[in-house]
Image: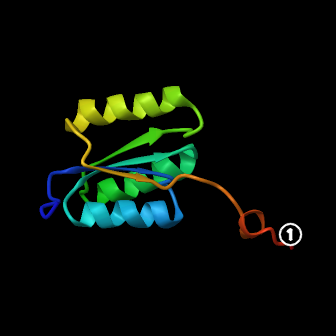
Amino acid sequence: MREFSGKTAVVTGAASGMGLAFARRFAAEGMNVVLADIEQEALDAQVQQLQQEERNVLGVIVNTMRRETLEDLRERTIERFGNIHILCNNAGVASLEDTMGLPAG
């Protein structure tokens, strides 16, 4: 895809970290961006910030372990923007200790 403007990106885990970085970059390219995250307060704050920057965004609470929330994400995205062009499945919570088998602390 060479033209991003007006297309729609959905990013899970979008309220912080790499997910937020992806969402911000997609928005900077002129894309509609759906920020999906399990953390309501963090999600609301990032959606509000992007809206203040005049970005076309939608925030949706999603638990990627629950199919019904993913179905809601799909339905709300298509209802608002008509299609999904990029899906960035970034959600996940793990510490470095968990992923690398390192002792905590």
Local secondary structure at mark 1: loop
Q: Residues within 10 Å of mark 1 (few under 14, many from 20)?
A: few
Place of residue 19 in the rendered image (x, y in percent of width and height, measured from the top left): 46, 60
Residue 20 drawn above or below residue 43: below
Q: Residue at x 32, y 67 (%)?
A: 25
Residue 53 drawn above or below residue 84: below
Place of residue 45 in the rendered image (x, y in percent of width and height, measured from the top left): 47, 53
Q: Residue furthest front?
A: 101
Q: Residue at x 40, y 51 (%)?
A: 47
Quadrant that contains the C terminus: bottom right
Residue 17 drawn above or below residue 46: below
Residue 99 drawn above or below residue 9: below
Quadrant that contains the N terminus: bottom left
Coloring scheme of the render? rainbow
Q: Residue at x 22, y 39 (%)?
A: 83
Q: Residue at x 55, y 48 (%)?
A: 41
Place of residue 54 in the rendered image (x, y in percent of width and height, measured from the top left): 24, 57
Left or right: where 68 falls relative to 26: right
Left or right: where 69 falls relative to 88: right
The residue type indicated by label 1 comes to Ala
Which one is nearer the viewer's eye here, 6 or 97?
Answer: 97
Q: Residue furthest top?
A: 68
Image label count = 1
Give the labeled residue for mark 1. 104
